[in-house]
Amino acid sequence: MVSMAIMERPETPAATAADVERLVSPVNSHTEWDPLEEIIVGRLEGATIPSDHPVVSCNVPPWAGRLQGLAAGFRYPRVLVEQAQQEIDGFVALLESLGVTVRRPDVVDHRRRFATPDWSSRGFCNTCPRDSMLVIGDEIIETPMAWPCRYFETHSYRPLLKDYFRRGARWTAAPRPQLTDELFDPDFQVPKDGEPMRYILTEFEPVFDAADFVRAGRDLFVTRSNVTNRMGIDWLRRHLGQGYRIHEIESRCRTPMHIDTTFVLLAPGKVLVNPEYVDVDRLPGILSSWDVLVAPEPDPIDETLLKVTSMCGQWLSMNVLMIDERRVIAERHHTGMLRALEKWGFEPIPCDLLHYAPFGGSFHCATLDVRRRGSLESYFD
Protein backbone atom coordinates (compact mmCIF):
# COMPACT_ATOMS: atom_id res chain seq x y z
CA MET A 1 0.00 0.00 0.00
CA VAL A 2 2.82 2.41 0.82
CA SER A 3 4.50 1.72 -2.51
CA MET A 4 1.28 2.36 -4.43
CA ALA A 5 0.71 5.61 -2.58
CA ILE A 6 4.16 6.81 -3.50
CA MET A 7 3.70 5.80 -7.13
CA GLU A 8 0.39 7.60 -7.40
CA ARG A 9 1.65 10.88 -5.92
CA PRO A 10 1.72 13.57 -8.64
CA GLU A 11 5.19 14.77 -9.51
CA THR A 12 6.21 18.40 -9.17
CA PRO A 13 6.79 19.75 -12.66
CA ALA A 14 10.44 20.40 -13.44
CA ALA A 15 11.40 24.04 -13.90
CA THR A 16 11.64 24.98 -17.54
CA ALA A 17 14.30 27.25 -19.03
CA ALA A 18 11.67 29.98 -19.23
CA ASP A 19 10.87 29.57 -15.52
CA VAL A 20 14.53 29.93 -14.64
CA GLU A 21 14.85 32.97 -16.91
CA ARG A 22 11.99 34.70 -15.07
CA LEU A 23 13.63 34.30 -11.65
CA VAL A 24 15.27 37.42 -10.25
CA SER A 25 17.92 36.41 -7.73
CA PRO A 26 17.45 37.83 -4.22
CA VAL A 27 21.24 37.56 -3.91
CA ASN A 28 23.24 40.40 -5.49
CA SER A 29 26.39 41.80 -3.91
CA HIS A 30 29.52 42.84 -5.80
CA THR A 31 31.28 45.23 -3.41
CA GLU A 32 31.69 46.11 0.25
CA TRP A 33 29.99 49.51 -0.21
CA ASP A 34 27.00 49.42 -2.60
CA PRO A 35 23.72 50.39 -0.84
CA LEU A 36 22.84 47.58 1.55
CA GLU A 37 19.37 46.02 1.23
CA GLU A 38 19.53 42.55 2.85
CA ILE A 39 21.95 40.96 5.29
CA ILE A 40 22.41 37.81 7.37
CA VAL A 41 23.36 38.41 11.02
CA GLY A 42 24.80 35.58 13.12
CA ARG A 43 23.42 34.08 16.34
CA LEU A 44 24.85 33.49 19.82
CA GLU A 45 22.43 30.78 20.94
CA GLY A 46 24.16 27.44 21.42
CA ALA A 47 27.67 28.91 21.18
CA THR A 48 30.34 26.48 22.37
CA ILE A 49 34.01 27.12 23.06
CA PRO A 50 35.81 25.63 20.03
CA SER A 51 37.30 22.15 20.35
CA ASP A 52 41.03 22.03 20.97
CA HIS A 53 43.14 21.81 17.80
CA PRO A 54 46.46 23.41 16.77
CA VAL A 55 44.77 25.32 13.91
CA VAL A 56 42.48 26.95 16.49
CA SER A 57 45.01 27.77 19.20
CA CYS A 58 47.57 29.23 16.76
CA ASN A 59 45.04 31.78 15.50
CA VAL A 60 44.00 33.39 18.78
CA PRO A 61 45.94 35.51 21.29
CA PRO A 62 48.12 33.33 23.61
CA TRP A 63 46.03 33.96 26.72
CA ALA A 64 42.84 33.11 24.86
CA GLY A 65 44.50 29.99 23.44
CA ARG A 66 45.39 28.70 26.90
CA LEU A 67 41.91 29.39 28.22
CA GLN A 68 40.32 27.83 25.12
CA GLY A 69 42.33 24.63 25.54
CA LEU A 70 41.06 24.19 29.09
CA ALA A 71 37.41 25.02 28.33
CA ALA A 72 37.06 23.47 24.85
CA GLY A 73 33.66 21.92 24.19
CA PHE A 74 31.88 23.71 27.03
CA ARG A 75 29.21 26.38 26.69
CA TYR A 76 30.34 29.98 26.79
CA PRO A 77 29.74 31.49 30.27
CA ARG A 78 26.41 33.20 30.59
CA VAL A 79 28.00 36.51 31.56
CA LEU A 80 29.71 36.66 28.15
CA VAL A 81 26.65 35.58 26.18
CA GLU A 82 24.22 37.99 27.87
CA GLN A 83 26.35 41.08 27.22
CA ALA A 84 26.98 40.13 23.60
CA GLN A 85 23.30 39.22 23.06
CA GLN A 86 22.16 42.64 24.21
CA GLU A 87 24.56 44.28 21.77
CA ILE A 88 23.72 42.08 18.77
CA ASP A 89 20.01 42.73 19.37
CA GLY A 90 20.74 46.47 19.28
CA PHE A 91 22.77 46.05 16.10
CA VAL A 92 19.90 44.18 14.39
CA ALA A 93 17.45 46.90 15.47
CA LEU A 94 19.79 49.54 14.03
CA LEU A 95 20.03 47.75 10.68
CA GLU A 96 16.26 47.41 10.47
CA SER A 97 15.82 51.10 11.32
CA LEU A 98 18.05 51.86 8.32
CA GLY A 99 15.69 49.90 6.05
CA VAL A 100 17.87 46.77 5.80
CA THR A 101 16.18 43.35 5.73
CA VAL A 102 17.82 41.13 8.36
CA ARG A 103 17.84 37.32 8.12
CA ARG A 104 19.10 34.95 10.84
CA PRO A 105 20.36 31.34 10.85
CA ASP A 106 18.71 28.52 12.78
CA VAL A 107 19.54 27.94 16.44
CA VAL A 108 21.93 25.00 16.78
CA ASP A 109 23.26 22.98 19.73
CA HIS A 110 26.98 23.23 18.97
CA ARG A 111 27.92 20.93 21.85
CA ARG A 112 26.73 17.91 19.86
CA ARG A 113 29.67 15.81 18.70
CA PHE A 114 30.07 14.95 15.03
CA ALA A 115 32.63 12.92 13.12
CA THR A 116 34.13 12.04 9.76
CA PRO A 117 35.99 8.75 9.12
CA ASP A 118 39.19 10.50 10.29
CA TRP A 119 38.33 12.65 13.31
CA SER A 120 35.57 13.88 15.63
CA SER A 121 34.80 17.26 17.16
CA ARG A 122 32.17 19.39 18.80
CA GLY A 123 31.01 22.57 17.08
CA PHE A 124 31.66 26.26 17.69
CA CYS A 125 28.91 28.77 16.91
CA ASN A 126 27.17 30.53 14.02
CA THR A 127 28.06 34.04 15.12
CA CYS A 128 30.13 34.88 12.02
CA PRO A 129 28.45 34.07 8.67
CA ARG A 130 31.19 36.12 6.94
CA ASP A 131 33.60 33.18 7.40
CA SER A 132 31.64 30.28 5.99
CA MET A 133 29.97 31.88 2.95
CA LEU A 134 31.21 34.17 0.20
CA VAL A 135 28.79 36.19 -1.94
CA ILE A 136 29.99 37.02 -5.45
CA GLY A 137 27.23 38.67 -7.47
CA ASP A 138 24.22 36.33 -7.45
CA GLU A 139 26.23 33.36 -6.16
CA ILE A 140 26.71 32.15 -2.58
CA ILE A 141 29.76 29.93 -2.13
CA GLU A 142 30.06 27.71 0.95
CA THR A 143 33.73 27.80 1.91
CA PRO A 144 36.02 24.87 2.89
CA MET A 145 37.04 26.04 6.36
CA ALA A 146 40.15 24.70 8.13
CA TRP A 147 38.79 24.52 11.69
CA PRO A 148 37.32 21.02 12.29
CA CYS A 149 34.80 22.44 14.78
CA ARG A 150 33.27 24.52 11.92
CA TYR A 151 32.87 21.62 9.48
CA PHE A 152 29.06 21.67 9.45
CA GLU A 153 28.55 25.32 10.36
CA THR A 154 26.71 26.23 7.15
CA HIS A 155 23.98 23.69 7.97
CA SER A 156 22.39 26.28 10.28
CA TYR A 157 22.08 28.57 7.22
CA ARG A 158 20.64 25.91 4.91
CA PRO A 159 16.99 27.07 5.20
CA LEU A 160 18.15 30.52 4.01
CA LEU A 161 20.36 29.07 1.27
CA LYS A 162 17.54 26.89 -0.05
CA ASP A 163 15.16 29.84 0.00
CA TYR A 164 17.62 32.00 -1.96
CA PHE A 165 18.23 29.15 -4.43
CA ARG A 166 14.53 28.56 -5.06
CA ARG A 167 14.14 32.27 -5.80
CA GLY A 168 16.94 32.34 -8.35
CA ALA A 169 20.32 32.57 -6.61
CA ARG A 170 23.27 30.41 -7.56
CA TRP A 171 24.47 28.14 -4.73
CA THR A 172 27.89 26.51 -4.79
CA ALA A 173 29.92 24.56 -2.25
CA ALA A 174 33.71 24.38 -2.56
CA PRO A 175 35.21 20.87 -2.21
CA ARG A 176 34.66 19.67 1.35
CA PRO A 177 38.10 19.22 2.93
CA GLN A 178 39.27 16.07 4.67
CA LEU A 179 41.07 18.04 7.40
CA THR A 180 43.42 15.17 8.12
CA ASP A 181 46.86 15.58 9.70
CA GLU A 182 48.42 16.07 6.26
CA LEU A 183 46.85 19.55 6.08
CA PHE A 184 48.61 20.81 9.21
CA ASP A 185 52.34 21.31 9.78
CA PRO A 186 53.13 19.26 12.92
CA ASP A 187 56.26 21.36 13.61
CA PHE A 188 54.58 24.74 13.16
CA GLN A 189 55.61 27.56 15.46
CA VAL A 190 54.41 31.14 15.19
CA PRO A 191 57.18 33.09 13.42
CA LYS A 192 58.92 35.75 15.46
CA ASP A 193 59.43 39.29 14.18
CA GLY A 194 62.10 39.26 11.49
CA GLU A 195 61.67 35.56 10.70
CA PRO A 196 60.26 34.45 7.32
CA MET A 197 56.49 34.12 7.29
CA ARG A 198 55.14 30.62 7.73
CA TYR A 199 51.69 29.11 8.16
CA ILE A 200 50.26 26.08 9.93
CA LEU A 201 48.53 24.97 6.73
CA THR A 202 50.19 22.83 4.08
CA GLU A 203 49.02 22.61 0.47
CA PHE A 204 47.43 19.17 0.98
CA GLU A 205 44.00 20.42 -0.19
CA PRO A 206 42.23 23.75 -0.77
CA VAL A 207 40.89 25.51 2.33
CA PHE A 208 39.82 29.11 2.86
CA ASP A 209 37.60 31.32 4.99
CA ALA A 210 35.50 33.84 3.07
CA ALA A 211 36.57 36.51 5.57
CA ASP A 212 40.07 36.45 4.06
CA PHE A 213 38.58 38.07 0.93
CA VAL A 214 37.05 41.50 0.25
CA ARG A 215 35.34 42.55 -2.99
CA ALA A 216 35.59 45.52 -5.33
CA GLY A 217 33.53 44.43 -8.31
CA ARG A 218 35.73 42.47 -10.72
CA ASP A 219 38.68 42.65 -8.30
CA LEU A 220 39.02 40.74 -5.05
CA PHE A 221 41.73 41.10 -2.44
CA VAL A 222 42.92 38.28 -0.19
CA THR A 223 45.36 37.59 2.62
CA ARG A 224 46.99 34.18 2.86
CA SER A 225 46.59 33.06 6.45
CA ASN A 226 46.40 30.21 8.93
CA VAL A 227 42.92 29.38 7.59
CA THR A 228 43.46 30.17 3.88
CA ASN A 229 46.17 28.42 1.87
CA ARG A 230 47.51 28.90 -1.64
CA MET A 231 45.36 26.05 -2.98
CA GLY A 232 42.24 27.70 -1.57
CA ILE A 233 43.06 30.98 -3.32
CA ASP A 234 43.79 29.10 -6.56
CA TRP A 235 40.49 27.20 -6.32
CA LEU A 236 38.50 30.43 -6.05
CA ARG A 237 40.52 32.10 -8.83
CA ARG A 238 39.77 29.22 -11.23
CA HIS A 239 36.14 28.98 -10.12
CA LEU A 240 35.46 32.67 -10.80
CA GLY A 241 37.28 32.57 -14.13
CA GLN A 242 38.68 35.32 -16.31
CA GLY A 243 35.99 37.86 -15.40
CA TYR A 244 37.63 38.41 -12.00
CA ARG A 245 41.10 39.15 -10.65
CA ILE A 246 42.34 38.18 -7.18
CA HIS A 247 45.18 40.22 -5.64
CA GLU A 248 47.11 39.15 -2.57
CA ILE A 249 47.73 41.60 0.26
CA GLU A 250 50.93 40.84 2.15
CA SER A 251 50.32 40.82 5.89
CA ARG A 252 53.02 41.32 8.51
CA CYS A 253 50.76 39.83 11.17
CA ARG A 254 52.49 36.84 12.76
CA THR A 255 49.17 35.01 13.21
CA PRO A 256 47.10 36.12 10.19
CA MET A 257 43.43 35.22 10.07
CA HIS A 258 40.86 37.24 8.09
CA ILE A 259 41.52 40.38 6.08
CA ASP A 260 38.92 42.63 7.71
CA THR A 261 41.26 43.94 10.42
CA THR A 262 44.09 44.38 7.90
CA PHE A 263 42.72 45.80 4.64
CA VAL A 264 39.19 47.23 4.49
CA LEU A 265 37.52 48.54 1.32
CA LEU A 266 35.33 51.51 2.26
CA ALA A 267 34.24 53.09 -1.04
CA PRO A 268 35.43 53.46 -4.63
CA GLY A 269 38.94 54.87 -4.39
CA LYS A 270 39.25 54.54 -0.60
CA VAL A 271 40.84 51.71 1.38
CA LEU A 272 41.58 51.51 5.11
CA VAL A 273 44.81 49.74 6.11
CA ASN A 274 46.33 48.51 9.35
CA PRO A 275 49.71 50.25 9.83
CA GLU A 276 51.01 47.37 11.94
CA TYR A 277 50.20 44.67 9.37
CA VAL A 278 50.46 46.45 6.00
CA ASP A 279 53.43 48.07 4.30
CA VAL A 280 51.70 50.65 2.09
CA ASP A 281 54.70 50.63 -0.27
CA ARG A 282 54.06 46.96 -1.03
CA LEU A 283 50.35 47.18 -1.87
CA PRO A 284 49.30 45.87 -5.31
CA GLY A 285 50.05 48.39 -8.06
CA ILE A 286 46.39 48.68 -9.09
CA LEU A 287 45.78 50.60 -5.85
CA SER A 288 48.21 53.39 -6.84
CA SER A 289 45.37 55.79 -7.71
CA TRP A 290 43.37 55.04 -4.53
CA ASP A 291 43.41 56.95 -1.25
CA VAL A 292 45.11 54.71 1.32
CA LEU A 293 43.74 55.65 4.74
CA VAL A 294 45.86 54.56 7.70
CA ALA A 295 43.82 53.36 10.68
CA PRO A 296 44.36 55.23 13.95
CA GLU A 297 45.64 53.38 16.99
CA PRO A 298 42.71 51.51 18.61
CA ASP A 299 41.33 52.87 21.85
CA PRO A 300 42.49 50.72 24.79
CA ILE A 301 40.06 48.26 26.35
CA ASP A 302 40.23 48.24 30.14
CA GLU A 303 37.69 45.49 30.82
CA THR A 304 39.81 42.57 32.10
CA LEU A 305 37.33 39.80 31.28
CA LEU A 306 36.98 41.04 27.72
CA LYS A 307 40.74 41.27 27.22
CA VAL A 308 41.21 37.70 28.46
CA THR A 309 38.35 36.11 26.49
CA SER A 310 38.57 37.97 23.17
CA MET A 311 39.41 35.77 20.19
CA CYS A 312 40.50 38.84 18.22
CA GLY A 313 43.41 41.27 18.25
CA GLN A 314 43.26 44.94 19.17
CA TRP A 315 42.61 46.07 15.59
CA LEU A 316 38.98 44.98 15.72
CA SER A 317 38.31 48.72 15.60
CA MET A 318 38.70 48.39 11.79
CA ASN A 319 35.91 45.79 11.57
CA VAL A 320 33.25 48.15 10.23
CA LEU A 321 30.19 47.61 8.02
CA MET A 322 29.44 49.92 5.10
CA ILE A 323 25.76 50.76 4.63
CA ASP A 324 26.60 52.63 1.44
CA GLU A 325 29.50 54.71 0.12
CA ARG A 326 29.20 57.23 2.96
CA ARG A 327 27.43 55.68 5.94
CA VAL A 328 29.41 53.21 8.04
CA ILE A 329 28.56 51.34 11.25
CA ALA A 330 31.53 51.39 13.64
CA GLU A 331 32.17 50.48 17.27
CA ARG A 332 31.08 53.21 19.69
CA HIS A 333 34.02 52.51 22.02
CA HIS A 334 36.64 53.31 19.38
CA THR A 335 36.25 57.07 19.28
CA GLY A 336 39.54 57.51 17.43
CA MET A 337 38.21 55.47 14.51
CA LEU A 338 34.89 57.33 14.55
CA ARG A 339 36.68 60.69 14.34
CA ALA A 340 38.99 59.44 11.57
CA LEU A 341 36.06 58.18 9.48
CA GLU A 342 34.34 61.55 9.87
CA LYS A 343 37.53 63.37 8.86
CA TRP A 344 37.78 61.22 5.71
CA GLY A 345 34.27 62.26 4.62
CA PHE A 346 32.21 59.32 5.90
CA GLU A 347 29.17 59.39 8.15
CA PRO A 348 29.95 57.00 11.03
CA ILE A 349 27.01 55.43 12.86
CA PRO A 350 28.18 54.43 16.37
CA CYS A 351 26.94 51.10 17.68
CA ASP A 352 27.91 48.73 20.51
CA LEU A 353 29.36 45.31 19.68
CA LEU A 354 32.48 45.23 21.85
CA HIS A 355 31.41 42.08 23.70
CA TYR A 356 31.04 40.07 20.50
CA ALA A 357 34.85 39.65 20.38
CA PRO A 358 34.91 36.40 22.43
CA PHE A 359 32.72 34.88 19.70
CA GLY A 360 34.92 35.87 16.77
CA GLY A 361 34.59 39.46 15.64
CA SER A 362 32.59 42.63 15.18
CA PHE A 363 30.24 44.20 12.60
CA HIS A 364 31.83 42.86 9.40
CA CYS A 365 32.46 39.39 10.87
CA ALA A 366 28.96 39.13 12.33
CA THR A 367 27.25 39.69 8.98
CA LEU A 368 26.99 38.52 5.39
CA ASP A 369 25.66 41.11 2.96
CA VAL A 370 23.31 39.20 0.67
CA ARG A 371 21.97 42.03 -1.45
CA ARG A 372 23.44 45.42 -2.26
CA ARG A 373 21.92 47.70 -4.90
CA GLY A 374 24.50 47.78 -7.66
CA SER A 375 25.91 45.99 -10.68
CA LEU A 376 29.20 44.33 -11.57
CA GLU A 377 31.81 46.97 -12.44
CA SER A 378 35.55 47.41 -12.61
CA TYR A 379 36.96 50.08 -10.26
CA PHE A 380 40.50 49.95 -11.63
CA ASP A 381 42.07 50.75 -14.98
Image (cartoon, rainbow, N blue to C red):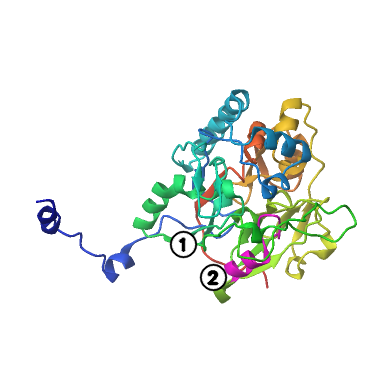
- Would you place residue 103 above or below residue 267 in this image? above
Q: Which residue is mark 1?
A: 172
Span of residues in magenta: 223-237
Q: Is residue 195 magenta?
A: no
Q: Amino acid at mark 2?
A: His
Q: How many marks?
A: 2
Instruction: Name above or below for residue 245 compared with residue 296.
Output: below
Instruction: Give SS at disc 2.
Output: helix
Q: Identity of the amino acid at label 1?
A: Thr
Left or right relative to 242: residue 101: left
Residue 51 in view of the camera:
yes
* Closer-to-camera residue (123/358): 123
- From the image, tell me which residue sits under label 2: 239
Residue closest to the eye, 189 or 62: 189
Mark nearer the N terminus (2 vs 1): 1
Question: Residue placed at 26% from the left, 65% from the top?
Answer: 15
Q: Secondary structure at mark 1?
A: strand
Q: How many residues crowd mark 1 within 10 Å: few (<14), some (14–19), many (20+)?
A: few
Q: Is residue 201 left or right of residue 122?
A: right
Q: Is residue 323 visible?
A: no
Quadrant in the picture for residue 191: bottom right
In the image, residue 255 above or below residue 125 = below
Coordinates of residue 190 in the picture (x, y in percent):
80, 51
